[in-house]
Image: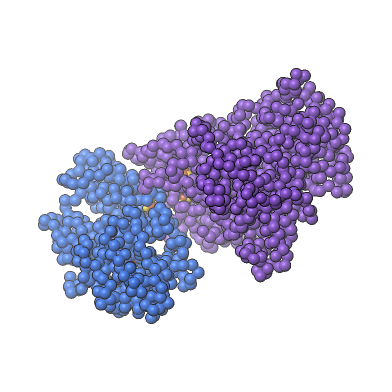
Amino acid sequence: MAATNNYEPILSAGVTGTVYSGRSESLADYRAKGGYDGLKRALEMGPDKVLDLIKEANIRGRGGAGFPAGVKWGFIPRNRERPHYVCVNADESEPGTFSNRSLLEQRPHLLIEGALIAAFATLSESVYVYIRKEYYEATRQMQRAIDDARAAGLIGKGILGSDFNCEVAIHLGAGAYICGEETALIESIEGKRGYPRNRPPFPAIQGLYMSPTVVNNIETLAIAAEVMRRGVEWFKGIGTEKSPGMTVYSISGHVNRPGNYELPLGVTMRELIYDYAGGIRDGNKFKAVFPGGSSVPMLFEDELDVVMDFDSPRKYNTFLGSTGIIVMDETVCFVWASLNLMHFYWDESCGQCTPCREGTNWMYKILKRLEAGQGVNGDVELLEDICGNITSRSICALGEFATGSLVRTIPRFRAEFQAHIDQGRCPFEKGYMRFG
Amino acid sequence: MTMKIPDPSVLVTVTVNGRGLMLPKGKNLLQALLDVGHYVPHYCYQPALSVAGNCRLCLVEIEGRPKPEISCNMVVTDGLKIRTDSELIDDCRKGMMEFLLMNHPLDCPICDRGGECMLQRYSMEYGWGTARTVDARRRFVKPQFDPLIDIERNRCIMCTRCVRFCDEVGNDHVMGVFGHGSRNYIGTFGNGPVSNPFSGNVIDLCPVGCLTSKPFRFEARPWELRQTLTTPRHANGIVTAWTRGGRLLRVTPPARRRHGLYTIDEDTTRFISNEVRFGSLYTDNEDRLLEPLARGKDGKLVKSEWEPALDRAAEALKACKPGEACFIAGERSTNEEFYLLGRLARAVCHTPYIDWRGRFVSESAAQAAGVALSASDGDFDLLDKKAYQAMLIVAAGDLYESAPDISLRLREGARLKRTRLGLIDSRVNPWLGDLAETAWLEQPEKIAATLIALAEALEKGKDPANAPQGMEKLFKFVTAEHGLLVLGLDSAGGAIAPELVPAALRILRALGVGWHFLPVTAARNAKGGFVAGAQSDRVPTGRMIDPELRVKADEIYGSAIPADPSPAAPGLLEMAAQGKFKVLVLHRCDELVHHPRRELIEKAIAATPMVIAIDVFPSWITERAAIVFPGSMFMECDGSMTDIDGTLQRMSKGCRVPGNAQEEWRIIELLGLKLGDTRRSKRAHEIFADLARAWGRPDVTLDSITLKQPGPEAPQGTHNYFGVIKRPDFKLHSSERPELAIAANSNATSGRSDLLTLWWIQHSQGPDHLGSRSSQFDALRPRPRVELSTADAARLGLKNNDWVLLEGGSEQPSQVLVNPTLAEGVVYGAANVLGLRLADGAGLPHVNLMPADAPAAEILEQEATARR
Ligand SMILES: Cc1cc2nc3c(=O)[nH]c(=O)nc-3n(C[C@H](O)[C@H](O)[C@H](O)COP(=O)(O)O)c2cc1C
Ligand code: SF4
Ligand code: SF4
Ligand code: SF4
Ligand code: FES
């Protein structure tokens, strides 16, 4: 814990609570802290230099895949044959992930500055901020911030006296998790069904309205704003070598102090759970944890010392994902937990491609039977087989996400699954939530 | 979406399962593999539609990539190495099939698609063979949304072919995916019918039994049906007619062979209109002529034997002095019938009076159409490899209503980005307009002037500076190096053709040699009419008669032909109405039955002592004839048709002619024999052989123009899986670009400001002597409707769905549709739907719109039920 002991939050500086507290950073407050200086510096440097700087900083995407933002921006053609677009992904719908929300509500100007820098570097003049519609307060604060920024000449024509023009508009989601997937998000902005697209073409070539498009998570853009203001050296001084910088971990589940924790990349899972989140509730025993939202495979007791950066979890076949950490204690039944999540993925699968549409449906039916004590021998192996038939064969990653709660769990806890069949009931005591 | 046209000439090496294949660079990988006979299973990929990539059945392994990739979303690149036979791919396919089947009902025994279902097929080839699911299957309630298309959602595999077809080909965004996740389903917005004239194609495209044909439902199993590759009598194109026991049960695009069996080709790109698919079922109409009829002494038409009826007809013809007999051949006659009639009239009866252009309202219109058709050298089959830089469609947008099959061919070229599209019309149909680069809306009277203005500018040179004021975009469009000028001949019965055709020929010269000319008309065998010589100024070479050719004609017919000129069909009808003829032969004159100039036709029949009709259905014309010979349906007779671009189509006999009816060519030959001609053919092939000799192509036979049935499936190494449809490279073109001034109608442009110009068409789904006899057509029949421009509607205080009467047009009230892309001062409607009557054929009619009462509620209700 030593290295991170005295880390002062940067992105979430001044942010309180995970639920809107009624306080949102105003334009004046933000500028007083040096806000929009990064944009000013970018405008002075010109788009090409900004792009180089972001590339050098190696800001890895905080939306889940950890793809370097600079490289992504670099895919955008360096001409203006077609309009370019920047889409800000604020659709945060991943179960167990709630860090974007506080930033949206309380530090909207930081996000706007980041988005403007992205637009400037990618020769774009339009930014869409895609917010899930349930984030009512976030939308309100964001809209207010956009209005204030426009009034102050930070959005619109000739920003800060330069010849850079840029518009920022909010687009609300309609309640679909899949619209957080970048191409589904693009389709949704175009007014179509949120169906992910096949790649190629990639959004950087044919994205929104068939034009070059960058889609970035809001946290990625917030970091870009800080990097522009404070410099690459500063940024690289935080985090690990391959995963520089910080992120906001959302910790939830059976811990004593759930909440958002902004920390440098590179803390271990054990530190997060025991040092920051205050350990497991009621003195219970730890059972498993989702390290990056419900879509990635779980980590177990003996794996807690894994370093939480973009690369280390891969050795356990899991990922940093959305940095939403869901901790489960010994009272949790894996069948029940998987059923809970499978209900979500079955419900949220867009239904476009065969493996995910039918696979989630099938797994959900099987898990429902298992949990109700109506499993038959072979069901557990069937589940494993279905996971294999989905993974890598669907259009987008949601298909694979749906298998997150099973792929590592079944091999390690096969007995627990099988017990549901053998005993004809769920061996755990639970008094809450039923599905179906 | 910009689609780059891959250059098929550049072949690169792709290693498939360790074997090197030469594939065209840049082409869709799946299609390229299919083309060379390397079959890859696929559901959602359809060659004519955009790539959806949702079924995940076409996954292939690619060397150097960690995951399998869908081949339908890849292009051929040099050095690509793929595997389609690995364990992984096998597993992928098995898994996908299992997913698709886990919620699929066990409906095969009662499913219409059984036997030609791709789900059945792939299950056998790539599936597990056993089910691992014990859970209840998903069920949807069964809705009804279309009168002709049945939906059984439980069987749907969500490949979205139907949705993409309606969006992309039909431009009718009515089908969609509703719901989400595993509960999503196919439906139509507002639960309305699929309302584009090509909607029936979703039945063939659907790889499973989700969308099936209501008329065909539960009628037969595909393997019980006999298939005939043929062409319809009432529309362009090629189809498979599926019959059982002489009864036509369904019509589809050409079937294709798989596993030794010909089944529906769900990967077809030869879409057919509903007019063909459902309209062809007129053959089921029991009100058919099956016996020759002859008028008895009491004046009643009664059944007769062939011999006495033929004798009576022959006697009457024999009694005619030269020039006293007149022959009108319907536009739906086959080439052979045209040929035989031309011969019978000219070489046997020695009368110059033969023509086929009954559809046109005036003599000058018909003459102009003839001139245009003989100048044609264009090709609309843009689905084939040929592509034009630009296609300018003039006054032919309404083919969408009047001849959808032609219209579709034109549009496909633009949709697939093989050509750019420009329009000059009085009514811009969004169906075409949406794809057009430039559209010029003009009143009918002024279209010719627009062309001339363009031509004059072009004559000065292609420099943009020469563009006429305000026409810069259009001018730029026509400066393309090579292109196709498509000219509509039909609108308002050809009323503007006399000015339009010379204008078109003029601009054509100005456009330069790179431009081709395709005049279009809904008349089915218009091209055949003169290439087979059913026109007095033509010999069966399709060429204009000159002294030299006259000798040739004498040779072809074996007898001299009269030298005097003859008017076209409208002029012949005028002559007949004046009592000039003793005998009038009406050979399958379908277009006269619902003709707006019925008065003239009635007069012509009344004034002629002996009217001989050859037909398949009774009509007011056969009722007034003295002798009626019963003919054959399109799947009962051999022959050939010429599509509007000159493509020969084979009409082939799949069943025998029932009752006492006969194939038409036999009837004409029998009549000829009675009159002393010696010609007696055993088969239609012999007649075609004569024609082919006249065309100077004796190598072409009737059998050689039959489309080759697709070869056995997946022949390794040939290029014939999808591109199975081979035809001889032979088209009938007769390109003479005559300098010809056609006498313009005196009052063609006398527009009066208080009246609206009536711009009418014959609707392909409206009353028709053949199509609308199909019981399925009740559901398709368009409502009586007139279209008005926004400005006129405002001026007249009319809005959508108001009822009006066309004063001086029809007695039936019709509903207003305000069309923002209709030229001002124009009212547009379908003559056969409105029951339009024209007193004369002089120029464009002008009418008044009178507000009218809505028809009684019961009548509307009845109509609505029929459509449901
Ligand atoms: C099913 C699905 C849901 C996703 N939801 C989100 C989301 O809510 N927020 C987000 O930022 N990225 C989400 N992503 C990831 C995005 O597709 C994309 O990778 C990300 O926006 C890229 O931003 P970054 O490069 O800044 O990380 C989701 C991906 C998938 C497959
Ligand atoms: S994987 Fe699932 S969510 Fe993604 S496209 Fe396929 S069905 Fe839709
Ligand atoms: S769609 Fe095919 S597999 Fe399904 S019931 Fe019909 S025939 Fe059988
Ligand atoms: S109805 Fe048929 S064509 Fe349409 S999505 Fe379903 S299976 Fe495919
Ligand atoms: S054919 Fe390629 S995914 Fe369906």
**Quarter of the figure that contains the C terminus of chain A:** top left
> What residue sits 46% from the left and 52% below the top?
B52
Q: Is residue B577 left or right of residue B8?
A: right
* A322 or B366: nearer the viewer: B366
Asked if residue B856 is positioned above or below residue B119 in the image, the reply reads above
Q: How is the image coloured?
A: by chain
> What residue sits 25% from the left and 77% below the top?
A32
Picture coordinates of residue B181, whole percent (x, y):
36, 48
* A344 or A360: nearer the viewer: A344
Q: Is residue A73 left or right of residue B537?
A: left
Q: Is residue B339 left or right of residue B114?
A: right
Chain B: its colour in the image is: purple
Is residue A243 shown to the viewer in this render?
Answer: no
Residue at the front extreme of this rendering: B754
**Quarter of the figure that contains the N terminus of chain A:** bottom left
Picture coordinates of residue B265, whole percent (x, y):
55, 43
Is residue A156 shown to the viewer in this render?
Answer: yes
> What residue sits 72% from the left and 63% below the top?
B456
Q: Quadrant of residue A314?
A: bottom left
Residue at the top extreme of this rendering: B298
> What residue sits 17% from the left and 56% below the top?
A254
